[in-house]
Amino acid sequence: MPAPRGAVPVQDRGRFRRRLGAGFAGLLGGAAGVAVAQLVAAAARPQAAPLVAVGATVIDAAPTPVKEFAVRTFDTYDKPVLLGGIGLVLAAVAVLAGVLARRRPVAGVLGAALFGLVGAAAALTRPAAEPGDLLPSVAGAVVAAIVLHQLPRRADGPTRNGSAPLAAVRTTDRVPVADFEAEPAAAEDPGRTGGTRRDFVRVATVVAAGTALSGAAGYLLTQIRARDASRSRQTVRLPAAARPAGPLPTGVQPGFHTPNAEFYRVDTALTVPRLDVDDWRLRIRGRVDRPVELRFTDLLRRELVERDITLNCVSSEVGGPYVGTARWLGVPLAPLLREAGIQAGADQVVARSAEGMTIGTPVETVLDGRDAMLVVGMNGEPLPHEHGFPVRMLTPGLYGYAGACKWLTELELSTFDDFDAYWVRRGWAARAPVKTASRIDRPAPFARMSAGTVPVAGVAWAQRRGIRAVEVQVDDGRWQVAALAPAPSADTWVQWRYDWHASPGTHTLRVRAVDGRGEVQTGQRVAPFPSGATGWHTVSVTVA
Ligand SMILES: Nc1nc2c(c(=O)[nH]1)N[C@H]1C(S)=C(S)[C@@H](COP(=O)(O)O)O[C@H]1N2
Ligand SMILES: [Mo]
């Protein structure tokens, strides 16, 4: 190396800069690959996008405690956090591939191939995968491979043996000491190094522009898809119910129905499945005498019922937010299954969804007279996409993971011995009746208020059994009976209220319910896993 004495720092800095450039080139290659993969997926099948498929695979593979931690820590941001994490790992790998590819372009190709393999493997092993789902990953990998092969070495200028890595560079017998920026040595021959840098910048610019374009096109396609899907939803005209729910009993307070936009959402879907109602089919198969396939219009021709039903999630903590009540319009499920002819021994209905969820419901709960239904309407409109459009299942009295499959596509009559549904495989209870629960909504935790009469209010629920009474305890005092608003049925929550004569100081408010069978809600604190939380909701407040 003809590096002059004393110029070592400059040379080091030059090498660092070349590596920086190569790392940046790697990042660009990764970004280009992802953008192209997303674009191809947006055009073909959104769920086949490598980021989404890898994310979904991570969600499915994550042990239950990790999932719980993620939901607890990040709440509804768990999915963006997951995608962000995957993005960071990807970026790190891309930078590394770029740095290595500066001297060995084949390393860049290998890095890209790895990216493609992981993405394709994830996409192809999704429960609802199709062979074509490997295309987005392959397309992305090819683009990333080309960029990672061509760009990082251009960060380097002419190589040691004098052969220029690109035609535009004039050969020289001198190794550029610093070619990425106008360092002293480079300044001696601005034409040569300028050419190298210019070529790197030119290629990088083209790649960046292509990446941005692909990204924009992918985004646009996604928007168009969403618009088409919402059009499909808008074409739906729901018939009136043969058995409507009727007006709410007088005395029911505002807020009884949870508006669709505020209804909690719990699912494993990284992208909301947006199904087209005309393409939708429901197969009823398995241990039935007459398998059937139904279209959406077939469902609407049947007798529809309308019911107020409270739905809640098993993963909700005591006092947690994953509970809501809606007016559901749907097709009663029991007659539908009976028509298909349930065979002796079948004790589990396995519901499958468009994105591959499986939810197992005891056959007896569908047939015992409760309003188990295939829901098509929610609070007066077609089901929102987030809540399972066009059709979801709903089983009053069971937690959502055991009876409320969204984006429903198949009902298989099976047995609990033969099949473990998604959450059961992850340790959650196979049979999951809702536990009696109550919640204080007012006052808010740690609220400050002045002495006098303070309304304490909230909801209590024990679907199928109903709520007989709600009691409130202040500090360690006697349990006081709260006033209950009427409820349309045992399948909904009940609004309660207790007028508390608050005295100055810090106080603890506690609530418990008594279900329709006279059983008092247990105060024993139990975590949501594996069959639902128990314990009394407690709120501390300060009275001035
Ligand atoms: N396809 C599908 N259906 C699903 C789920 C899911 O992840 N995928 N989650 C279940 C769970 S755990 C609950 S609590 C309810 C929540 O329904 P919601 O999001 O409409 O409130 O949907 C159930 N149905
Ligand atoms: Mo749930």
Image: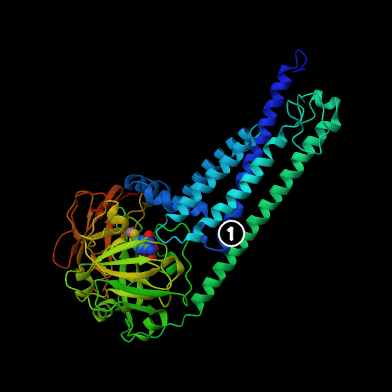
**505 w.r.t. 46: above or below:** above
Q: Quadrant of residue 326?
A: bottom left
* Residue drawn where x is 36% and y is 58% of the image: 321
Residue farthest left in this picture:
518
What coloring was used for the rendering? rainbow
Residue 379 drawn at (x, y percent): 40, 75
- Amino acid type for the residue under numbered disc 1: Val
Whether residue 126 appears in this view of the structure is yes
Q: Is mark 1 within 8 Å of ligand 1?
A: no
Q: Nearer the viewer, residue 220 or 311?
A: 220
Q: Nearer the viewer, residue 252 or 428?
A: 428
Which quadrant contains ligand 1? bottom left
**310 w.r.t. 502: above or below:** below
* Residue drawn where x is 25% and y is 69% of the image: 484
Q: Quadrant of residue 174?
A: top right
**115 w.r.t. 330: above or below:** above
Residue 339 drawn at (x, y percent): 26, 81
Which quarter of the image is occupied by the N terminus? top right
Instruction: Name the element at disc 1.
Output: helix
* Residue drawn where x is 66% and y is 51% of the image: 211
The reply, left or right, for residue 101 in relation to residue 167 is: left
Residue 238 drawn at (x, y percent): 42, 82
Q: Nearer the viewer, residue 242 or 120?
A: 120
**Residue holding disc 1:** 40
Q: Quadrant of residue 376?
A: bottom left
Whether residue 404 appears in this view of the structure is no
* Residue drawn where x is 37% and y is 79% of the image: 294
The reply, left or right, for residue 115 in relation to residue 297 is: right
Residue 241 drawn at (x, y percent): 35, 84
Callout count? 1
